[in-house]
Amino acid sequence: MNKEKKAVAVPGEQLGVEEEYMPGAGVYLEDGKLYSSTVGTLDIDTKNRRIGIRAGNIVAIPEVGDIVEGVVISPLKEDSAMIKIIAIRGKKNLTGTFTGILHVSQAAKSYVNTIYDVLNLSDRILAKVVTSWTPYQLSTADDDLGVIYATCTKCGEELVLKRGRLFCNRDKIFERKKVSRLYLLREE
Amino acid sequence: MEKKKLITDDGIRYDGRKLDELRPIKFQIGTLKNADGSAYVEWGRTKILVGVFGPRESHPKHLALADRCYIRARYHMAPFSVEERKSPAPSRREIELSKVMREALEPAIFAEFFPRTTIDIFAEVLQADGSTRCAAISAASLALTDAGVPMRDLVSSMAVAKVEGKLVLDVIDQEDKQGDSDMPMAIMPSKNVITLIQMDGLLTHEEFIQSVELAKKGCMEVYAKQKEALEEHFKKTMDREEV
C-alpha cells in the first residue's frame, strides 16, 4: 500500500492499514485503515512502526500541563482570580483568548491568606493548566510560575524585582506577590 | 422578458461550455492574515472568501457543548455581489445556507477533540454567479484544514441542474433561474459519503440517479483542485520556514 512515498498528505488520504503502522500525530484509524487528518509531510518511524504527519499548522488550545501566559482580569472574590489566557508556551499564539481561574489554594506552595497577597488586577502571570476545559483551573505554585510583570497599584509605575520582592521606584514601597523566577524587570 | 435559449442544438451552453464541463476553478489558501485559516475561491465568476477562527472559547458561553466543539457557520453575500444591491442584513436564504454549510462540513470535522469550544466559519460572497453554496463549502473545508483543524476528509461540492430537459454540471446563475431543477451536492470524496444534498424543482427518479452520478464526477474534479491547492500552499510555507 502506498509504495511511492508521497511528499504531502491531505485530509482523508489513506496512508496504510492498521496492520502496518500505529497511528501517530495527525493520523486516525477508521475501519482498520489509517487516514491523514491534516495536511503535512509523512513521518514514518520504522522502529516503532508508527506513522504520523508533520503538519504545517496545528490548532492550539490549552491542555493539562501546559504553561500559559495570562493577564489577571478580575480578582473574583478573596479566594480566586479570573485570568485571561493569551498565549501558550511552546505553541503558536492563540488568536482568541481562553478564561482561566486561579484559586488561592493553587497559588503558592505555602499558605496564602487572600488572592491579593499573590497577584492583583492587570498583572501578567505564568501559570500551569490543571483541568482540561474552560474555565481552566490554573496553578502558580512552582518557582517558575507566578507574576512575570506588574505595575504599582498606587501609581502605575513598573515594578522591579529587588531582593526577591517587587519594588516601586517612585513610591519606594514593596508589594507582596507570588513572583516568578522569570520576572521580567529586575534591579541589578 | 423573453427567454434566451440556454443550450444550443449541439449541446453547447450559454457560456460556451459542454454539458458536463466545469467552469475554471481556482483555490487560494492562507489569504487572510488575521484568521486562523482562510481560503479564497474563484469559481468562474463566483468569488468567495472564507475565514476560519478557532477552536476558541464559546461566546455566549451557553452555546458550549460538553462533549464536542460547537461549529458556527455564517454565509453572507456582500451588497455588491449581485447586480441589484443586496441588503447586507441576513436574509432567509442566507440563514438557510449558513445552516446547510455547517451541516455539510460537520461530519468532516473531529469536533469531539475540542469540547466546550467554538469553531467559527465565515464565508463572504464577493461576487455571485451561481453555485455559491458549493464554492463556499469547498473553500471552507480548505480554510479549516489551513487552520489546522483535524479533519476526517475534505468536503467537495458541486451542483447539477436540469435545463431545457438536459442535465448540466456546475450551474451558473442564468441556468439556475431559467432551469427546471437545481441539485447541489457535497461529498467527502475519499470516504464516498454525501454530506449535503438539496433539490429544487422536479426530477424523475432516473434523472435523480443520473444527477447524483454527474454531481459526484464534478465533486471529484473539485477535489483534485483542492488537493493541488493544499499541496502547493503547504510546500510554499515549508520553503518559507526553511529560508
Image: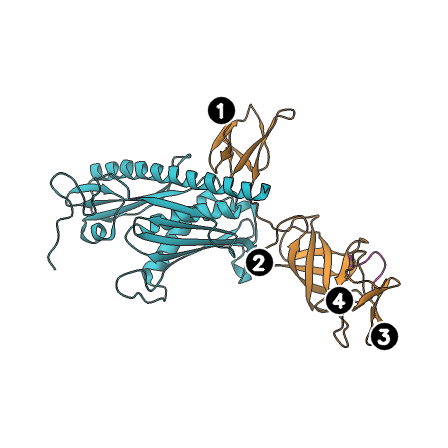
Do the CB atoms of the residues marked 4 and 1 lie less than 8 Å apart? no
The answer for which chain carries disc 3 is A
The mark closer to the camera, 1 or 2, is 1
Name the residue carrying label 1.
Answer: A4
**Does label 2 lie on the same chain as label 3?**
yes
Do the CB atoms of the residues marked 1 and 3 lie less than 8 Å apart? no
Amino acid type of the residue that numbered disc 1 sits on in the rendered structure: Glu
Name the residue carrying label 3.
Answer: A172
User: Is B232 placed above or below A137 here?
Assistant: above
> Is B11 left, or right, of B104 in this rendering?
left
Which of disc 4 and disc 3 is earlier in sequence?
Answer: 4
Element assignment for label 1 = loop
| Residue A158 included in the magenta stretch of the image | no
Shown colour of chain B: cyan
The mark closer to the camera, 4 or 1, is 1
Element assignment for label 3 = loop
Between A78 and B78, the residue placed more toward the observer is B78
Q: Residue furthest front?
A: B243
Shown colour of chain A: orange
Mark 1 to mark 3 CA distance (whole Å): 70 Å
Residue shown at 12% from the left, 49% from the top: B5
Name the residue carrying label 4.
Answer: A150
